[in-house]
Image (spheres, helix red, strand yellow):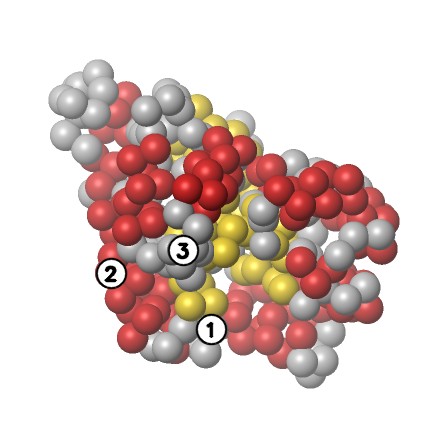
Amino acid sequence: LCRSLPQVQAALEAGVSFIYADFEFIKQFPAAVEAVRAAGAQIALATPRIHMPGENGYHNNILRLQPDAVLVRNTGALYYYLRHRQENPSAVHPRLIGDFSLNIANHLTAELFLEVGCDVVTPSYDLNIQQMVDLLRVSPTADMEIVIHQHLPMFHTEHCVYCTFLSEGTDYTNCGRPCEKHRASLQDRIGMSHPVRVDEGCRNTVYNAIEQSGAEYLNHFLELGVSKYRVEFLEETPEQVHEVIDLYNKALRGEISGTQVWKTLKATNQLGVTRGQLVK
């Protein structure tokens, strides 16, 4: 999952055949679609995390770009795409991949979202390793995708950090859109800077400064039949994208252990890497 065009290009160079584009502004999507299609790969476009009344235009635009799949992050978006399928049965529809924010935390919710129309679902980030294993043992693992590397999104807010601190405006009509030119972060009491990203509706998502890796549990997931894994980037450089993808590819091929992946990432990452909620 890439959040900039240079990351998309780096992932393609690394041989990735399926890329998620999670850009802040929908006007950035066409370039990603063009680059991925030119490389002979497939692309999924991500919906915003929040779906407010009157925001269906965002989903209309996604459909017009004809992605191979849509990363669906809330039930409002899921309803929209399922209704579009019903109303246009002869059209070619993108696959629907339910993201972690649908809160799929047990086999019942996994089955529910698969039955209503999701083609693939992502387990919730609330699960520790034992809970994840319990879920996978009784769920259709062929239809599940696990996020094994990401900056955990900590919270979402309608209060725009960019508008407040980088402009004299009050909203998107008069703020000058500083979010299109600058990157902001929130510093906590111990000095960690947590990146803040925006969406098309001017909502902010605050991400944990430290990357989270589930590499040490890859063998568990592989033994349980999981074949789909997602690596999510945030502010990584193209060089870092190459390095991370290479490490996880080697682990999936059995050339290095998941522990080696984790230790290498921890050694090369300025802020470190955490095992995250899986160890709880």
Disc 3 residue type? Ser
Q: Residue furthest bottom?
A: 255
- Distance from label 1 to label 3 (Cα)? 27 Å
Which residue shows up at 35% across the image and 41% down it? 59
Quarter of the rendering occupied by the C terminus: top right
Mark 1 vs mark 3, foreground winner is 3
Q: Residue at x 47, y 67 (%)?
A: 18
Viewer-nearest residue: 175 or 274: 175
Q: Which mark is residue 17?
A: 1
The image quadrant of residue 218 is: bottom right
In terms of sequence position, does the residue under pointer 2 or pointer 1 come before the other?
1
Q: Earlier in the sequence, mark 3 or mark 2?
A: 2
Secondary structure under tag 1 reads loop
Q: Amino acid at mark 1?
A: Ser
| Neighbours of disc 2 within 10 Å: few (<14), some (14-19), many (20+) | few
Q: Which mark is residue 90?
A: 3
Q: Residue 104: x percent and y percent?
A: 68, 40
Q: Which residue is mark 2?
A: 31
